[in-house]
């Protein structure tokens, strides 16, 4: 079996967000780029599944839609352990466009399992994974917290409000993964970094695809008012403020 | 022209977030001078369906099929798209929760309709159609323009509130033809947490972090949650350590929540944590360190030891109730 992990390239989670050109563009000067945290977890889980020989997975590849400046992120995915990286050479204009590009690749190069993250930490679209499933006419399972291939059938766990479901699914499918899928993301080791240099990073041209949405303006949240401090010996005052000032009790 | 809201049920019942969704969508329908159609899938009794009339659901299309009680995103998206097609809908609105996240993108592809997730308020403009959503995990907002004729939105919890607007709710049954081939997933088991407030639904959340020092100290957190009827949550290291379950982890890589009141006890307030809670209406921080960044985002703060402050607070709330 083959697993494809979709990788989104996002600003480091501690980035101070700024905009330019009259708040119409994200200002990426000085920004550190990382693999989207959920995609890193998805990749880690895919590699764990591959290392368990019983699962007979012979390939874990990563795919990304983006320009050449994102190759460092893909090299990192290779260093963590992916066998191959594919970059569709295009600007990731919107979720529909990105999912369409990945689906076009999948139609030519079939995989059994596709992993995507629940959302990109930059534009928080939470849509690419399920859109790929629809373009491919595959089952798509969202909020996946675990994948188990150890038996003859594929078993997934998905979070539902206040609980979880154990689900049987047939390949091929798309799993949109979230927290819980594995504990810690893997960090590239020296050996992995050396090996990554020799691994294939294929660059493919984009196909014709529509873009349906665009960000026309950005704004920063309003600054928060000062925090009102209450003496630890006087918690009754807090209760009173929550009731009568904030009106939330 | 019409506007569709997808009213998801949980075991045959609607939640407050569904009422908010119907209220929101009714408002858009009014702004556009068009009709609201609410779609319900799976078994729901007529009385519960009619309850949506209180929020402006004049027409309700119910697909009352027990086979569809369990969320299968392929089936749900097909049914909603089919109705949208038939009714000439140009805006389809869902709640931004597990099911909305699974269904909305599929509708978007089926109908070639631009989609925006977790919209924060009513559209900024109707023509061109622009909505506001949070981006960069809460560090900013984007105004997103949808250029396709049909538009799909999911709305964030507590973005609009519940607005009463009593109308007579006309229920129509609809039986779509759905190919068996679409049911490729099968639920083997379901586990539900019993007698606990569901975090994503909770109006009040008591959350604690590494400042609790040990999982054995969580009794004081649970007691406070109990008097408040609150849900419990935690920071990421706490769930990574296995002190609490993953379902309690809030933040950028955990759940994003928007309760009315959020207590952060022994939580430093790292930017990734704040990403998950910044939409709370009111934040109370309890921390021993006056310099902790959580005080920068909190509305009220107490400097002190969680093990002393939390029991006192529980006591004070109990007293204020009696
Ligand atoms: C990619 C990425 C994603 C992340 N995602 C998340 C996420 O989704 N959610 C999340 O929470 N974190 C996330 N983190 C981790 C985050 O950066 C912080 O490390 C984490 O939030 C800290 O948790 P904490 O506040 O419980 O612990 P700490 O930072 O250790 O803070 C403990 C606090 O408790 C206080 N304290 C200690 N003793 C007491 C006492 N007796 N009484 C009162 N106060 C006391 C201390 O003063 C301190 O402020 C992420 C990190 C990365 C890199
Ligand atoms: N440009 C991209 N290239 C490849 N995969 C992507 C891209 N953008 C998003 N994804 C995948 O889709 C998931 C959800 O992203 P989004 O829908 O943008 O929030 C991410 O976690 C990735 O797995």
Image: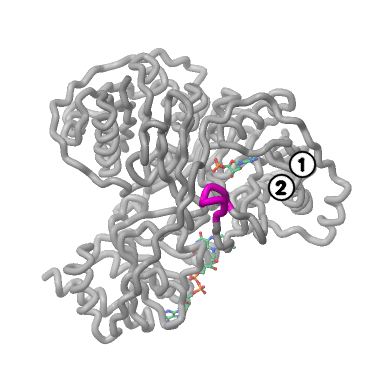
Which residue is labeled 2 in the image?
A47
Kindly identify the residue that appears in the image at 83 percent across and 50 percent down.
A196
Image x and y of residue B212, in percent: 43, 75
Q: Is residue B235 magenta?
A: no
In what element is the residue under mark 2?
helix
Q: Position of residue B318 (x, y in %)?
A: 18, 72
Specify few, some or many for label 1: CA neighbours under 10 Å numbering under 14, 14-19, or 20 or more.
many
Chain of the residue displaying label 2: A
Q: Are marks 1 and 2 in contact (CB under 8 Å)?
A: no
C-alpha distance separating marks 1 and 2: 14 Å
Above or below, A26 relative to B65: below
Ligand 2: does it lie within 8 Å of the C-beta at label 1?
no
B148 versus B178 height, above or below: below
Residue drawn at x 46%, y 77% is B292
Question: A220 or A168: which is nearer to us?
Answer: A220
Mark 1 highlights which residue? A85
Q: Relative to the observer, which residue lies in front, B185 or A92?
A: A92
Q: Which residues are magenta?
A: A19-26
Q: Residue furthest right?
A: A198
- Residue A54: image quadrant is top right
Q: Is residue B9 left or right of residue B143?
A: left
Can marks 1 and 2 be said to lie on one chain?
yes
Could you tell which of marks 1 and 2 lies nearer the N-terminus?
A: 2
Relative to B72, does residue B286 appear above or below in the rendering?
below
Q: Position of residue A246 (x, y in %)?
A: 23, 66
Q: Position of residue B50 (x, y in %)?
A: 17, 29
Quarter of the picture containing the N terminus of chain A is top right
Which residue is located at x 64 percent, y 28 percent? A103
């Amino acid at each position: 079996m083959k697993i494809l992990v979709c990788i989104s390239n996002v600003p480091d989670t501690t980035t101070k967000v700024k905009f330019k050109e009259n708040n119409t563009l994200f200002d990426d000067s000085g920004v550190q780029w990382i693999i989207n945290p959920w995609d890193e977890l998805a990749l880690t889980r895919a590699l764990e599944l591959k290392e368990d020989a019983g699962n007979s997975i012979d390939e874990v590849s990563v795919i990304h839609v983006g320009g050449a400046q994102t190759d460092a992120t893909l090299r990192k995915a290779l260093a963590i352990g992916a066998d191959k990286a594919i970059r569709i050479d295009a600007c990731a204009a919107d979720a529909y466009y990105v999912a369409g590009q990945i689906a076009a690749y999948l139609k030519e190069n079939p995989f059994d399992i596709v992993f995507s993250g629940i959302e990109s930490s930059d534009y928080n679209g939470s849509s690419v994974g399920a859109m790929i499933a629809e373009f491919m006419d595959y089952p798509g399972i969202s909020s996946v917290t675990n994948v188990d291939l150890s038996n003859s059938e594929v078993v997934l766990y998905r979070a539902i409000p206040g609980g979880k479901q154990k689900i049987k699914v047939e390949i091929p499918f798309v799993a949109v993964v979230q927290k819980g899928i594995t504990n810690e993301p893997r960090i590239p080791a020296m050996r992995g970094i050396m090996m990554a240099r020799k691994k294939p990073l294929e660059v493919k041209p984009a196909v014709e695809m529509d873009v349906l949405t665009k960000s026309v303006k950005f704004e920063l949240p309003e600054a928060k008012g000062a925090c009102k401090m209450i003496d630890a010996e006087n918690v009754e005052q807090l209760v009173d403020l929550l009731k009568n000032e904030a009106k939330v009790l | 022209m019409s506007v569709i809201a997808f009213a998801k049920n949980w075991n045959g019942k609607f939640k407050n977030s569904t009422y908010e969704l119907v209220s929101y969508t009714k408002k858009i329908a009014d702004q556009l001078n068009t009709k609201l159609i609410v779609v319900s899938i799976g078994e729901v009794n007529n009385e519960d369906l009619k309850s949506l009339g209180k929020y402006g659901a004049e027409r309700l299309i119910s697909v009352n099929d027990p086979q569809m009680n369990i969320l299968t995103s392929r089936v749900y998206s097909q049914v909603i798209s089919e109705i949208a097609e038939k009714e000439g809908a140009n805006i389809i609105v869902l709640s931004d929760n597990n099911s909305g996240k699974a269904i909305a993108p599929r509708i978007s592809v089926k109908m070639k309709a631009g989609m925006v997730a977790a919209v924060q308020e009513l559209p900024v403009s109707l023509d061109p159609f622009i909505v506001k959503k949070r981006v960069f995990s809460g560090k900013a907002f984007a105004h997103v323009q949808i250029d396709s004729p049909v538009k799909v939105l999911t709305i964030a919890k507590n973005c609009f509130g519940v607005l009463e607007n009593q109308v007579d709710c006309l229920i129509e049954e609809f039986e779509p033809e759905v190919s068996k081939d679409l049911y490729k997933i099968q639920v083997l088991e379901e586990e539900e947490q019993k007698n606990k407030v569901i975090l994503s639904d909770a109006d009040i959340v008591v959350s604690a972090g590494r400042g609790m020092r040990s999982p054995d100290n969580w009794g004081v957190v649970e007691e406070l949650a109990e008097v408040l009827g609150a849900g419990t949550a935690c920071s990421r290291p706490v769930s990574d350590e296995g002190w609490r379950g993953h379902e309690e982890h809030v933040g950028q890589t955990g759940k994003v929540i928007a309760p009315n009141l959020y207590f952060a006890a022994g939580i430093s307030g790292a930017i990734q944590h704040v990403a998950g809670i910044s939409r709370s209406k009111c934040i109370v921080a309890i921390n021993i360190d006056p310099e902790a960044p959580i005080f920068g985002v909190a509305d009220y703060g107490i400097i002190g030891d969680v093990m002393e402050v939390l029991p006192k607070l529980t006591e004070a709330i109990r007293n204020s109730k009696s």
